[in-house]
Image (spheres, rainbow, N blue to C red):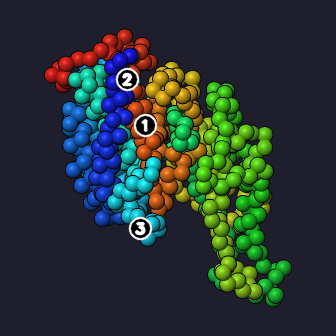
Amino acid sequence: MQQREQLLGAAGDYVDSGSFERDLATLVSYPSESSTTEGRVALKSYLDEVIEPALATLGCSVERFDSWRGGLNSFLLATRHEGAGLPTVLCYGHADVVEGQSAGWTNGRSPWSLGAEADRWYGRGSADNKGQHWINIVALRLLLEQRGSLGFNLVFLLEGAEEIGSPDLADFAAEHRDALQADVFIGSDGPRLAAESPTVFLGARGGVTFHLTADLRSRSYHSGNWGGLLRNPATTVAAAVGSLVDGHGIIKLPELLPAGIPESVAAALELIDVVANPGDPASDPTWGDGSLSPAERLYAWNTLEVLAFGAGNPDKPVNAIPGSARATLQLRFVPGTDTANLESAVRRHLDAAGFGMVDITVGNSFEASRLDPGSPWVSWALGSLEQTTGRKPVLLPNIGGSLPSFVFADVLGLPTLWIPHSHPGCQQHAPDEHLLKSVAREGLQIAAGLFFDLAVAASPAGADTGADNTAIPASSVS
């Protein structure tokens, strides 16, 4: 299709001409850290001066919800309505970044100044998430310039606190359900499976953190005088942890596991090889459930990780039985796991094992979600990516980490497609975060092709509604 190829060419030219690099330098210059007061001021400026004008140029009406309900999160909601018979896409990104960590950047780099070196663009937010949502905004603009209309209705949501857990996002979505309704959700965040592998993922594992504490005494006692008479809280907590997950990473409490792996998920993962990228640690073949493939363990099963363990003073141990000990654990889980009853299940287990003196406190949690790989939206997206790149894309039922995908899947009830434009080694939460120019270029073409196909080619939304996704004059946009 000639128009499609012309659009992909325009997308490639946008990167090759230096336009995207200049844009990215502007985006990175806003230190929009969601964890600091100063960063939230910069975030407001970023929305005021960059994002709102860019979406207004797309003919969107823009609503702002700064410090929504007096909280830490801010939202920008942009809408462009072209016709009742056209499909609607909801796009998402986050305007905040993690702390700059300026002291850790190497070779004189700054988190707030874009640095171009070979195929890398260095800067905080270049990959997570400014570069990625900007790719989608530019793709929409190029499509509008070519056709005079998008050919679909657009809703674009940006939030300002994803890096601190997306507080209030679920409540905001529920309250604005009508404004956020769409036929499909398309977001770009997280990494591809590998830099050279165009990827579609359909959700994310969830996570819940909990603490096991044995606070037995107000002070420590000499181990020679009291050893054998006083319960050691460190030994007790270590044994309590070991009763939940063994020394080879296998979860021993059935209530912390999913019921199984759906056939469609297992089939998708049969095609996935978990291969270390440059700079990655080597995986341990003896860790975890050996009956599962590495891809199944990472993407389709639960893991229970000990994040921290403390008792006494490890740097300067003394001959004393500590008075207390504490372990922090995190369950990474897939859909189908009953986390609502996690605290009661662990409590019953510890009591039955004789660890009634160990307290459990549940901390932060975020939900898991996954679109069925058999959804017609999945085959549609995979076909679009393959047509654009000439390569078979990778399909991940979900990523191993976490994103607020459940808000769009469960709160809004949308099919969720995540098309990442970054790579696993981008160091997004560390110094020297960077975006690969080659991935950004291909990502812009992928986004342009995907939006073009939504506008003019058969899609599940078009098939369902009978909509004719042909171009309409821009003057008819309401």
The amino acid type, in three-letter code, at marker 3 is Gly
Q: How many residues crowd around disc 2 within 10 Å: few (fewer than 14), some, or many (20 or more)?
A: few
Point out the frontmost of discs 2 and 1: 2
Q: Position of residue 109 (x, y in %)?
A: 40, 64
**Residue that badge 2 annotates:** 5
Q: Earlier in the sequence, mark 2 or mark 1?
A: 2
Q: Position of residue 388 (x, y in %)?
A: 45, 26
> Please, is residue 224 above or below residue 34 in the view?
below
Q: Secondary structure at mark 3?
A: loop
- The residue sitting at 59% across, 60% down in the picture is 361
- The residue sitting at 78% across, 79% down in the picture is 230
- The residue sitting at 69% across, 53% down in the picture is 282
Q: Earlier in the sequence, mark 3 or mark 2?
A: 2
Q: CA distance from mark 1 to mark 3?
A: 28 Å
Q: Quadrant of residue 463?
A: top left
In the foreground, 140 or 317: 140
Which disc number belongs to residue 408? Answer: none
Q: CA distance from mark 2 to mark 1?
A: 15 Å
Which disc number belongs to residue 108? Answer: 3
- Callouts 2 and 1 close, C-beta under 8 Å: no
Q: CA distance from mark 3 to mark 2?
A: 40 Å
> Please, is residue 312 above or below residue 410 in the view?
below
The amino acid type, in three-letter code, at marker 1 is Gly
- Indicate the quadrant containing the C terminus: top left, top right, bottom left or bottom right: top left
Q: Secondary structure at mark 1?
A: helix
Q: Quadrant of residue 76?
A: top left
The amino acid type, in three-letter code, at marker 2 is Glu
